[in-house]
Image (cartoon, rainbow, N blue to C red):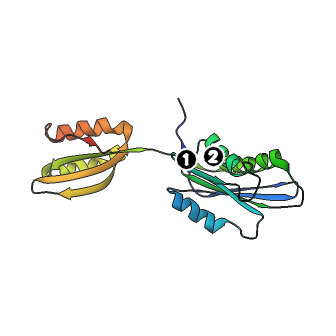
Amino acid sequence: MNSPLCTLAQPAEAAQDIKKSRFLCLAAPVASPDAALAFLARVGDPQATHNCWAYRIGQSYRFSDDGEPAGTAGKPILQAIDGQGFDQVMLVVTRWYGGIKLGAGGLMRAYGGVAAECLRLAERVPLVHKTEVDFELPFAVLAILKARLADFEADCLAERYGSDGASLRLALPEPRVAALAQLLADLTRGRSTLRRAD
């Protein structure tokens, strides 16, 4: 079984000097492509020779060689992200050229190496993917259910009230869905059922 994917607990960095070139990797947890590009705009050094980068957010990913030969920077950074089991992260590797050419293989090792080292040393937290569910329930049991949401690691995403009860949308870890469905059935004597939101 694969290990669960992780993201960064907080921003991280690592630096290496390779044949007089300075490589600095700055990494951050991000939840969207816009957040990833905002991080690039914030930390990229316009005075540096190159600001190469990659991000992975679920099935969405992008990378850039920023003027380095094609395939020698962005792709090795993305491979470091995937190889270390990370998701929802953005890495920017800035290079200040030191006068000695590294060649394609040397560039790939340098960019991929500093990215992998940054992630290896960083504090990681497991990503828990949550399932969204909808259900209705009478007012009489609403307070009881809400008091138990923490037990299910559930977040209330939406709540609407009608004349005889409430409609809720929750997000919770997939392994907890069956137990919540059972609690809901018990509280409402089987009158309320849980539906997965698609």
Q: In the displayed structure, does residue 170 sit left or right of residue 75?
A: left
State the CA–CA distance, disc 2 to disc 1. 7 Å
Q: Quadrant of residue 173?
A: top left
> Quick one: label 2, few (<14), some, or many (20+) residues within 10 Å?
many
Q: Which residue is mark 1?
A: 87
| Residue 55 visible in the current orientation | no
Query: Given the current orientation, which residue lies at the most extreme right position?
Result: 100
Q: Residue 131: image x %, image y %? A: 36, 43
Observer-nearest of 21 and 127: 21
SS at circle 2 = helix
> Quick one: label 1, few (<14), some, or many (20+) residues within 10 Å?
many
Q: Which residue is mark 2?
A: 81
| Residue 176 visible in the current orientation | yes
Q: In the displayed structure, does residue 72 sit left or right of residue 134?
A: right
Q: Quadrant of the C terminus?
A: top left
Q: In the displayed structure, does residue 185 sit left or right of residue 50?
A: left
SS at circle 1 = loop
Residue drawn at the location 21% of the way across and 41% of the way down: 184
Residue drawn at the location 58% of the way across and 48% of the way down: 124
Q: Are marks 2 and 1 in contact (CB under 8 Å)?
A: yes
